[in-house]
């Protein structure tokens, strides 16, 4: 998992926008959107329950 993913996952969990995530992480908004697409692909869904399951599997919750 890329270095910024845990931070992005927490931002997603809290409902932040891509723009907010970019400010928090120091990445560009386009990079954040690219990472989000990859995260959603790995999760297989855009739902919060799938996000929670993924975060538990990765040891983030």
Image (spheres, rainbow, N blue to C red):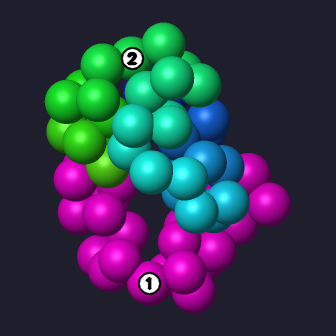
Dot 2: few (<14), some (14–19), or many (≥20) neighbours within 10 Å?
Answer: few
Q: Which residue is mark 1?
A: 47
- Could you tell me how many numbered marks the image carries? 2
Please tell me whether residue 26 is drawn above or below residue 53 in the rendered image. above
The answer to whether residue 57 is seen in the rendering is: no
**Residue 28: image location, x then y, percent:** 30, 19
Dot 1: few (<14), some (14–19), or many (≥20) neighbours within 10 Å?
Answer: few
Q: Is residue 38 left or right of residue 7?
A: left
Q: Quadrant of the N terminus?
A: top left
Q: Earlier in the sequence, mark 2 or mark 1?
A: 2
Q: Which residue is mark 2?
A: 27
Quadrant in the rendering for residue 58: bottom right
**Residue 31: image location, x then y, percent:** 25, 27
What mark, if any, has residue 3 been given in the picture?
none
Mark nearer the viewer, 2 or 1: 2
**Residue 9: image location, x then y, percent:** 56, 50
Please, which residue is most extreme toward the right here? 61
The answer to whether residue 43 is seen in the rendering is: yes
Q: Is residue 36 left or right of residue 49?
A: left
Q: Say which element carries label 2.
A: loop
Please, which residue is most extreme toward the top here? 26
Q: Is residue 53 left or right of residue 30?
A: right
Q: Is residue 5 left or right of residue 6?
A: left
Residue at 44%, 84% (x, y): give it: 47
Q: Is residue 45 magenta?
A: yes
- Magenta segment, which residues? 37-61
């Amino acid at each position: 998992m890329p270095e910024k993913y845990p931070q992005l996952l927490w931002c997603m969990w809290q409902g932040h926008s891509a723009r907010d995530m970019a400010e928090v992480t120091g990445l560009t908004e386009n990079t954040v959107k690219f990472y989000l697409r990859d995260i959603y692909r790995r999760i297989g869904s855009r739902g919060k329950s799938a996000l929670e399951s993924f975060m538990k599997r990765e040891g983030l919750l």
